[in-house]
Image (cartoon, helix red, strand yellow):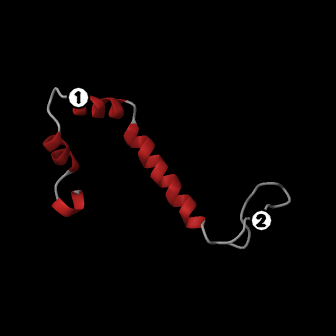
Amino acid sequence: MVLSTGRHPAALRDDVTTPAGCTIAGLLMLEDGRIRSVLARAVEEATKTSAHLGIGPTKISESGGGQRSGS
């Protein structure tokens, strides 16, 4: 929606919430629980993992480090 409208996410949020409403109360609780940083870390980890998909099987080194070889 941000891409299609060109509007800032906060402006879109303000369109669908009221200052003392239940939606904004829930969103504030999520932010208080650091949902943004958790989601950002999840996306980062998924991106790292997807970069390794299709490379081939993982070869475990003799030291047991689990590192990929041949890269």
Type of the residue with mark 1: Cys
Give above or below for 64 relative to 29: below
Residues at marks 1 and 2, CA–CA distance in whole angstroms: 51 Å
Left or right of 63 in this view: 15: left
Residue sticking out furthest to the top: 20
The residue depicted at 20 percent of the width and 43 percent of the height is: 13
| In the foreground, 4 or 49 | 4
Q: Which mark is residue 62?
A: none
Identify the residue position indicated by label 1 in the image: 22
- Quadrant, the C terminus: bottom right
- Picture coordinates of residue 39, whole percent (x, y): 42, 45
Identify the residue position indicated by label 2 in the image: 59
**Local crowd at mark 1 within 10 Å, few (<14), some, or many (≥20)?**
few
Give above or below for 5 relative to 42: below
| Circle nearer the viewer, 1 or 2 | 1
Type of the residue with mark 2: Lys
- Picture coordinates of residue 48, whole percent (x, y): 54, 59
Q: Secondary structure at mark 1?
A: helix
The residue depicted at 33 percent of the width and 29 percent of the height is: 29
Task: Place residue 15 in its image quadrant.
Answer: top left
Task: Place residue 17 in its image quadrant.
Answer: top left
- Picture coordinates of residue 14, whole percent (x, y): 15, 41
Left or right of 22 in this view: 19: left
The residue depicted at 79 percent of the width and 61 percent of the height is: 60
Left or right of 50 in this view: 10: left
- Picture coordinates of residue 70, whole percent (x, y): 72, 73
Q: Secondary structure at mark 2?
A: loop
| In the foreground, 50 or 71 | 50
